[in-house]
Image (spheres, helix red, strand yellow):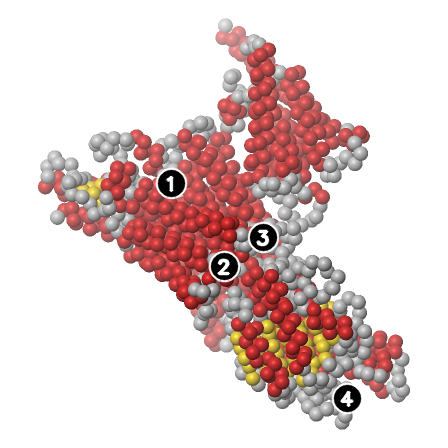
Amino acid sequence: MQRVPVLLFLAWTCFLFFSAIGLFTSGFLLMRVELANRSSCSDPLAASLPGPRAPLGSCWLPRRFPKAVLVIIDALKFEFAQYDPSRREPRPYENKLGFLHQLASLQPLHARLFRFRADPPTTTMQRIKGITTGSLPTFIDAGSNFASYAIQEDNLVWQLAQNGKRVVFMGDDTWDGLFPQAFHRSYFFPSFNVKDLHTVDDGILQHLYETVDGGEWELLIAHFLGVDHCGHKHGPDHPEMAKKLSQMNDMLRSLVDHLANDTLLLVAGDHGMTGTGDHGGDSEEEVNAALFVYSKAQLFQSHPPQEPETVPQVNLVPTLALLLGVPVPYSNIGEVMAELFAAEGGAASSLLAQLEAYSINARQVDRFLHSYSRAAQDISVEKLRRLQDLFSAAVEEHQQLSAQPGAPALPHLEHLRGRFRRYLQEARAVCAESWARFHPARMLAGCALLTSSCVLCYVASRVASGLSFSYRRLLLYPVLWGVVGVALPSLAHLLGWAAADLVLLSSWGAAASQCGFFWHCWAKWPWRSHAASACSPSAGTSLRQRLRASGLDSFVVAEAQVAPFLLASLVLLLVLRLHWEGRLEGGSPPALRLLGLLGVVLACARLSALFRQCREETPCCRSSTLLAPLSSLQDPGAKNSCYLLCLAVLALLAWGVRRWLRHYGNLNSPSAPVLFVRWGFPLLAVCVGGYWAITSGAEEALVKLHAWVQLALVAFPQGIFGLVLVGLLLVLWDPVTVFVRDSREPAEAPIVSPSSQAELQHVIPQLYRRMQQSLKSRLDEAKSGGRATVAAYGLGSVYSAALLICLALLGFLFMTLHSERLSLAFLLLFLEAFALLWMHGFLAGPDGSHPPTPDPFVVPWYALIAWALAAAQFFYATGHQPVFPAIHWNAAFVGFQQGHETNLLPALLVGANTFASHILFAAGCPLLLLWPFVCEMPTASKGKKSKAEPPDREEQMMEMRLREAPEKFSAALLQLGLKYLLVLGVQILACVLAAIILRRHLMVWKVFAPKFLFEALGFMVSSLFLLLGIGLVMRVDCAVSLWFKQLILAQSR
Amino acid sequence: MNLHAQVQVEIEDRTKGTMKETEIKRLLSANVICIFSIIVATVIPSLFLENFSILGTHLTWLCICSASVGTVNIVLYFILKPNPSNRRTSLAHKVARFLRCCVYFFMSCILFHGIIVLYGAPLIESVLETFLFAVLLSTFTTLHCLCLLGPNIHMWLRVFSKNGAMSIWDSSLQITAMCSVVGAWLGAFPIPLDWDRPWQVWPISCSLGATFGYVAGLLIAPLWIYWNRKQLTYKSR
Ligand SMILES: [Zn+2]
Ligand SMILES: [Zn+2]
């Protein structure tokens, strides 16, 4: 059996796909060029430099406030800050910030509430970047929230520090990563643990008033995280949120008491939150934050409008910079908030002062656009020219106006202000639009590479079953071609002829090696003979439907429903076709069993809808309550019964694997993995159960035992991780789960537990013919006439047993990472997978009840498509959605309550949580090949009632048929891997095509880009675990060969 | 002598051929009447009922359509007698048979309802809609079976297999039933689209799909049979 070449071939195919995906990603995910330029005090931007009356330390415009306090309350939604006294029964989050309302209504010229519109993506890091640089962070940063990167662009903090102002910071330690060493003084508190509501807030409150009174600062930033974390943990509609908001209210009240008269207070939310307390997208709820401005000195010249004004978030940057008398950061594209620049003494002087600020603002934006268009070509020239026209017209008018003696007319001034406004708004719109910039060439190339990889998969899977498949010709040579393909551009890169990066190089290599493959393939096989269509019509239509399904955004949104629908259709169609062809006798036991399996699959597909999470795009959808952790249940009775149900699932999983192994005789084996199944599985179940007991218990009830609870919260999951690891290693170390009984010495009791003696009566010994023959030939000489046979129990299912043990271990791991009640979803997953396997075994099985398929070594397309559909279905059915706010971040803290040192481990945990279904189905993919052989057993076993029958008759070969033909076995594994890769590849190809076609679609950032990222990651994870699964089968095969050798040696002795 | 036999065979063939053609004509006329009944069920009630429309009062339309197609089918069965049974049957036997037909029809409605729910239809909300849709599907499929084959499930199972059709009526049954189910299946696809059209509401697109499929099946069946009349050989039962 060729093991290494098969794995290498699959790995090479995976590499082809990966480089294609990488190439596409580099063209599709947006980037914005960051400019290194910084503004400085001496820039000649102001029409007139600050006059002699201006206070000291003013740049560009006389400062209005020497000091400012910026309080950021994370996820302060606009609704939280609104106050409506007429509300009869306020919800927990309503009417809690009464102090703001009190200030605004008592001192309307000193305080005002605004709607603060955040730009998507609404993750905290992107928003901090936005409200300090005045720019629009692009999508590519959205995924990097795990590790903050220092801001390279010009920003407020840097400007203040540069102009001799002291910035003091307290709160969220994201700022530490963004502004390393930038603060005069700082108090950072850990922000990553979203379950911790109080550490950051209490930390700030300890230092806040002291620092305010101390007065050694010009800008004080306090970033409170409690509200956001409360949203993530409990959702906005929870009594805990009321407590948190009331605490913020009290904090603001005392803060205002401590403020001096010349200090500006800004209270802002960095983003809002959805109904479930999450954020990250661009829905109205996430984008709407609150901004509150207050000063003890008079701020405004006019009374507030009825409906609070809407202010884009970037507008805070130029406003705050000019109010504090520092230069506006270079890359700012925000617009000053005019109300805050109105001067005393009538409308005309107000307008003049505002115009002054606008003019500086406009010059700064114009300067930025000039430098930006020099550094990058992504803003179209026409638009730049149009902006330039707007700008010069406005500036010219402004200059004429200031040259004019006497007071200008009011309408004239207002008209000019309108012009400046329009220019700034259009500039912002142009930037926002063009920073959705693509590399069409790379996207197309990536798409083409992906298509050709799919074709390659198909061709290779057709060719693989042929006996003339040569790895040297089809693997080695193409790889050499690929090496040449990499070498040429990298040489060019080194010599400086052309620029190349890693993605480009790998895709050159992939393209070259593909050419090599097709060349050699074409030369060797004029593959006319292979070109016959193999795809069964049903499978074809289903795949095409799936392809089409990802094309439309509504289908992406509704994929959670579409996948089970298609799966149900496919399965039903298979059964109907069987009936149509007359292979299903009505009323016969196999037919009834098949119908039962069909029912199980349909029921599982339907029930899995209970565990679905909602996207924000589907308004009337309500997320399943089963997704919430048990601790959120109020009713103790319901909680207990749910808990018991979850325990039952655990027990069922452990018992199911045992039952299966016992049925096939693997459980009697004295090997280490079986011992682990006997003792380790119950222990694992107990650990998971204990962990759930603690996490679901009410926190108040466990206050006394706090230390113990903390210990258990860490010890249980880590114990589970350890046990799972030990189990996997044991399977790898000794995967042969076979029990041998030598019929020559029946008196000798084998080394098994007493109960297994009875079990032995139920299991069928696998008398392996070749083994028998080889033994016979040696033993016949020793004992003439005596029938010496060795019965090996569980030999026929040795491959599947190892895979099943691994899958069950992974299942335990994933259940721990999910919230308690999702274990029911995992139960459905295993049930459905097994029902599919049995159906497939029935349809393709080599037993005699119906005409066998032409080649049992070929896994048909319908089975693989059903498998892939089930994987997609359970991605949704385990409470996931391909959008960022739906990621279960909590999984990172299972077993690591205190957070992490590195980013690798939490990424692995969250990844394992998100792609649990992909992993299980991909790793279990070889079962599709093995199962028909395993299924051989039940029908034939009926005939073998009496054990007295002579063993001459044909024995149960089961999986040993595969071993009989090692070449075909390896080819079958290769073909299986290639086919599954192709099915997955077609899915991602559909996704990529949709992203290309709809890249200017309104929904691209909301629907397609996240979908593409999830699909790409899912593909990578799936292909990796597919390789691992196939590798495990090969490891078992290796071990079985060794085992045979040892057995023969032992017998001949 | 030999010649004589040959001529006789030829004549037999020809009469068989003409018989087949008259059968096809009868089938065509029956199917046209069925289609006509659907059109009538859509048009006529708007004369009597206010605000009647397929989309607006979909449930009423479902009821009327099922009822009219069902009645027409039963009437046609009595007129055409496609499978005349030779056995002489007593009144009691007929009544029992009729009751069994009713039970079978009701059970098929329940079964369709279950399958539709398994395919993702809401379980508790809009039970009535789902059930009426199941009734419509049963009318298009099960009622035909009942009329043609009687309450005999083994016969039904036989007819829906590759070589199971024994007359052009059976072939027609195969085609119309398949077309109705496929139409209903295709009708599910527009539901998730965000076009906000009134016909995207459950179960309108599906029942319309089923109806169009049924009509298409009724039209296709005689044509298909006519087209393949040479290849079609039916064993007598
Ligand atoms: Zn935030
Ligand atoms: Zn958050």
Q: Chain of mark 4?
A: A
- First reached walking from the N terminus: tag 3 or tag 2: 3
Q: Residues within 10 Å of mark 4 (few under 14, many from 20)?
A: few
Residue appearing at x 77%, y 66% in the figure: A307
Farthest-out residue, top: B1
Q: Residue A932, labelled with which disc?
A: 1
Above or below, comparing residue B108 to residue A452 in the picture: above
- Of B90 and A302, which appears nearest the observer? A302
Above or below, comparing residue A303 to residue B74 in the picture: below
- Of A470 and A970, which appears nearest the observer? A970
Residue at mark 4: C-beta within 8 A of ligand 1: no
Asked if badges 1 and 2 are on one and the same chain, I answer: yes
Q: Chain of mark 3?
A: A
How much space separates mark 3 and mark 2, taking CA atoms? 23 Å
How much space separates mark 4 and mark 2, taking CA atoms? 65 Å
Above or below, comparing residue B43 to residue A56 in the picture: above
Q: Chain of mark 1?
A: A
User: What amino acid does circle 4 point to?
Assistant: Ser
Residue appearing at x 73%, y 64% in the figure: A84
How much space separates mark 1 and mark 3, taking CA atoms? 39 Å
Q: Position of residue A875 (x, y in %)?
A: 51, 52
Residue at mark 2: C-beta within 8 A of ligand 2: no
User: What amino acid does circle 3 point to?
Assistant: Ser
How much space separates mark 1 and mark 2, taking CA atoms? 48 Å
Q: Are marks 1 and 3 in contact (CB under 8 Å)?
A: no
Disc 2 designates what residue? A698
Q: Residue A623, labelled with which disc?
A: 3
Disc 4 designates what residue? A48
Q: Position of residue A776 (x, y in %)?
A: 16, 40
Residue A410 in view in this figure? yes
Q: Are marks 3 and 2 in contact (CB under 8 Å)?
A: no
Q: Position of residue A180 (x, y in %)?
A: 54, 80
